[in-house]
Every structure is written in C-alpha cells, then in structure tokens.
Image: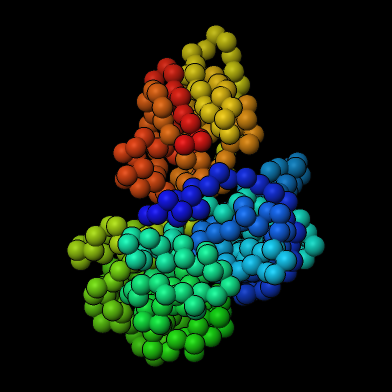
C-alpha cells in the first residue's frame, strides 16, 4: 500500500455539516443520497472507491427523548469534482429491519436537509497496480477522467449481497475505466429482483463493458433460468459458482461485501482453494452479533471513588487527557474516552469499520472483535478502541499515529 493510499484511508475522521443535494429512490426500501461538498471542504472529502462515510444526526428514541444516532454507509459513486472546486458524496441507505436511522432516512430525508457527515474512511479499496501502488490512487489524481488512466490491467472478482453492492459498484466502475484490458466478475446476491439496488446502473455498466464485465445475479427467492443463479449462496453453490460461472483462476483481487455469514463463507472457501489472504478484501455490514448492536457507544458509567478503576490515558489531535474507568464496568476504551472527549472518532462501534483505531502505547488490553485491522496493524500495536478493554491498571493509547 502506498503512503498516499494509507493517508486517504487513515485520515483523521472529522464531522462537518453537509447539505443533501438529492435523494433518489433505488428500490422500495433503499435510497441514494447525494451530499454537496463545498470547495473549501473538498480536500477533506476526497476518497477512494470502496470507502464509507459516517452520518450523524439526532432522532427521538423510544421514549421520545433526543438521541444521537450514527451510522456508516459506503460511498456508491466514483470520485467527481466540479469546475468550481466543489465535489459530492453519494451513499446508498437501505432500510434495515428496526433500524432507526435507515427507516427515518428512507421516509423523511430530502434535498436541503443538513446532516453531520464524517470525512471518508475505510480500507476496502483496491491495492492492485504498478509497483504496488494503487490504481485507485491514480484515479484520485484524475477524478473526472478515469478512462484516461493507464492503470495496470487486472482480473477482479466481487461477491456482494444486498447493499454490499454499494462500495463494489464504485470499485468496479473505477477499475474497469482505469485499463481497457481489466476484467471484472461480479456475483450479486439478493432475495428477489425487486431488491436489486443499482439495477439500471449495473445494466449500463454491462453495456459499456460487454466483454470485460461478467454480471451474475443470484436470487434466493425467485426462480431464474439457470438453477445455479437461484437460491441462497451456501457452500455448495459457492463452490459451483467458483468452478463454473466465474473466472476464479489468476484473480488479482477478490472483493467480498455483505453480511457476516456470507463473507466468512467466501473467505474460508477461498482460503481452502489456496487464495492468499492478501488478495482478498472484505467488508461486513455488521458484526452479525445481535448482542453487540451497532452504535452502542458512549453509554454513561457512574464513577465512584471507592471502586477500583483503570486509568486510561489517550492522545487525540495533539491533546492528552485521561479518564478513570471502573473495573467492574468492563467498558471499552472508546466508551471511557467519550465521557471526557465527545470528539473521539467512531462510527460502527462494532469492530467493523476501523474508525476508532488507535495505537496502544503502554499497558495491555483484550479486544473482543476485530473485522477491521489487518495483521500488520495488529503487529504494530494498533487496536480498535470500541472493542478493547484494559487488562492492566494503566493503559495509554494514541489516536494520532
Ligand atoms: S468504531 Fe467501527 S471498529 Fe470501532
């Protein structure tokens, strides 16, 4: 990964008010939301295809009390900038069952509304390219003309389910435009045709690259002509897809995006077929752990001087502070830090997005879940603060490095 790519994918997260320019309905329960980014903020909102933004607003909770809600959504379009220096961010928001934010957005959000939008984050990006540099990094230097880029040709396969198509469509468009020899196979799983997001855009992409893009829609609750394209993707179907429908040999990068079970099945299956993990990028919607709901961060902890506490010291934006965390509370470092610094970065609070990453400087922690950090980051001492609990009396972390 190049320095530039690391910078773009690990930039300090910060929120700004952005205005909704357009809301477009994609399916009965999904919308595409376009935020206008003014020229003075454009530098903070450039991104690599595959990254996401967190959205923040205040909505009434079950008791009618105002409650801060944050959710992260993948960016669904390749980067664009306009002559006046402004740019835009497009995300797709699919209504989750019982999801406060997604239900509200699908019903209420409209052009002119203002939301807090975090600067783009995430490492679900292509690392394929000349000299180990990213083709997508080159795209950032020529945002409006990706077809003019001479990226190294590549062979890519993506397996996406439901709204997992959102980052994948941005990645596919970019990589296909970057080199005239690049090939992209996309398996897209949904329940039924009416659930397929970006149906027209995918068809247009296929028309644009008829011989280089192979598009396979798999529908679990609708009969398709090919039996292989009908039904849930389980181990048997995945093996069959890999053996017959898609080119699975000499693939430069695999992109997996969907619910935990599907992504895990694909990762295990690819590993068993000898695919090296460094060729596989994946992104999860959720941890798949209902006992750890997303957004459960910043809950109040009552401090009592008679109790044993951990001392958590943290540095953020050059400022160092500390907070005492009662040992019995078993709160995460993120939760503790949020009590004294509300600007500590986080998005999913579920170990998925990596926004809360910090480096452990002293002390020890135990981390519950990790779907975001790669082994080299773990080896360097990085932790997900939303998942990390102190196991030594004193712990120091640094969000700035
Ligand atoms: S906030 Fe997403 S991994 Fe911690």
Q: Is residue 128 above or below residue 352?
A: below
Residue at far top of view: 306
What coloring was used for the rendering?
Answer: rainbow
Q: Is residue 363 above or below residue 307?
A: below
Residue 95 horizontal/vertical position (percent): 61, 63
Q: Is residue 316 above or below residue 183?
A: above
On screen, residue 9 versus residue 200, left or right, reads left
Residue 93 horizontal/vertical position (percent): 61, 63
Residue 183 horizontal/vertical position (percent): 36, 79
Q: Quadrant of the N terminus?
A: bottom left
Q: Give 367 or 75, whichever is nearer the viewer.
A: 75
All told, the count of numbered labels is 0
Q: Give 317 or 306, whichever is nearer the viewer.
A: 317
| Residue under the point 36% across and 66% down | 129
On screen, residue 361 versus residue 37, left or right, reads left
| Residue under the point 58% across and 58% down | 46
Q: Is residue 286 visible?
A: no
| Residue under the point 23% across and 75% down | 249
Instruction: Indicate the quadrant where residue 217 lies.
Output: bottom left
On screen, residue 178 versus residue 87, left or right, reads left
Q: Is residue 368 visible?
A: yes
Residue 171 horizontal/vertical position (percent): 47, 69
Q: Is residue 365 above or below residue 380?
A: above
Q: Give 299 or 186, whichever is nearer the viewer.
A: 186
| Residue under the point 50% across and 22% down | 312
């Amino acid at each position: 990964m190049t320095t530039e790519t690391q910078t773009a994918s690990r930039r300090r997260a910060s929120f700004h008010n952005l205005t909704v320019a357009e809301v477009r309905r994609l399916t009965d329960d999904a919308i595409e939301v376009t935020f206008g980014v003014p020229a003075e903020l454009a530098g903070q909102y450039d991104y690599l295809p595959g990254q996401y933004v967190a959205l923040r607003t205040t909505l009434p909770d079950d008791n009618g009390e105002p409650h801060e809600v944050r959710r992260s959504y993948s960016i669904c379009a390749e980067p664009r900038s306009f002559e006046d220096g402004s740019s835009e961010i497009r995300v797709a928001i699919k209504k989750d069952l019982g999801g406060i934010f997604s239900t509200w957005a699908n019903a209420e959000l409209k052009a002119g509304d203002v939301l807090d939008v975090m600067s783009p984050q995430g490492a679900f990006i292509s690392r394929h390219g000349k000299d180990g540099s990213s083709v997508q990094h080159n795209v950032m230097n020529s945002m409006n003309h990706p077809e003019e880029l001479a990226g190294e040709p590549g062979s890519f396969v993506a397996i996406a389910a439901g709204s997992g198509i959102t980052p994948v469509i941005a990645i596919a468009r970019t990589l296909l435009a970057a080199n005239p020899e690049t090939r992209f196979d996309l398996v897209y799983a949904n329940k039924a045709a009416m659930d397929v997001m970006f149906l027209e855009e995918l068809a247009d992409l296929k028309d644009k690259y008829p011989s280089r893009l192979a598009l396979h829609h798999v529908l679990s609750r609708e009969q398709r002509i090919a039996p292989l394209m009908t039904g849930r993707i389980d181990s048997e179907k995945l093996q069959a897809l890999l053996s017959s429908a898609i080119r699975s040999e000499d693939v430069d990068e695999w992109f997996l995006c969907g619910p935990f079970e599907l992504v895990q099945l694909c990762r295990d299956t690819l590993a068993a077929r000898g695919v090296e993990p460094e060729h596989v990028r994946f992104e999860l919607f959720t941890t798949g752990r209902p006992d750890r709901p997303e957004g459960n961060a910043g809950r109040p902890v009552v401090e009592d001087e008679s109790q044993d506490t951990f001392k958590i010291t943290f540095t953020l934006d050059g400022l160092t502070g500390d907070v005492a965390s009662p040992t019995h509370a078993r709160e995460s470092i993120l939760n503790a830090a949020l009590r004294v610094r509300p600007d500590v970065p986080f998005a999913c609070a579920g170990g998925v997005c990596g926004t809360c990453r910090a480096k452990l400087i002293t002390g020890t922690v135990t981390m519950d879940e990790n779907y975001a950090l790669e082994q080299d980051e773990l080896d360097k001492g990085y932790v997900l603060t939303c998942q990390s609990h102190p196991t030594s009396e004193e712990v120091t972390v640094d969000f700035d490095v």
